[in-house]
Amino acid sequence: NFWLSCMLIDPGCPVTFMDVINKLREYKVEARPLWKPMHMQPIFEKCDFIKAGEKAVDEDLFSRGLCLPSDIKMTQQEQDTVIRVIRSCFTEE
């Protein structure tokens, strides 16, 4: 539905989601971390939380994911710029 596009960075990758966000900011492109899981927010910190395994899925996604610019009005040039900037984070120039 084009409302929200996100990306995950592989665990162990030397590039972090904040590296990508900061690089996009240099080009005046807004990107954000994925939404913080509710159980990690102060208002809910004392509430029960159930997870399966060592690390909750939402904590994993939050630790390595980001929301990309998403808009049906983005031009092809704007999309190409976002793609180029993100790729530059993972390749040597």
Image: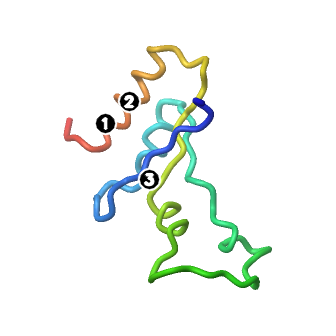
- The image shows residue 77 at horizontal and vertical percentages of 44, 15
Residue drawn 75% across and 82% down? 47
Residue at the (27%, 44%) spot, across then down: 90
User: Is disc 2 placed on a helix, strand or loop?
Assistant: helix
Question: Identity of the amino acid at label 3?
Answer: Phe
Q: Name the residue carrying label 1.
A: 87
Identity of the residue drawn at 62% across and 81% down: 50
Residue 84 position by quadrant: top left
The answer to which of marks 3 and 2 sits earlier in the sequence is 3
Of residues 88 and 9, the one drawn nearer to the viewer in this rendering: 9
Q: Residue at x 71, y 84 (%)?
A: 48
Q: Identify the element where label 3 is drawn.
A: helix
| Labels 2 & 1 near each other (Cβ < 8 A) | yes
Which tag, 1 or 3, sits closer to the chain's start?
Answer: 3
State left or right for residue 44 relative to residue 60.
right
Judged left or right of residue 29, residue 37 is right
Instruction: Say what amino acid the circle numbered 1 marks.
Output: Arg
Which numbered dot is residue 83? 2
x%, y% of residue 46? 75, 85
The picture places residue 53, in percent across and down from the top left corner, at 46, 82
Label 3 sits on residue: 17
Colour scheme: rainbow
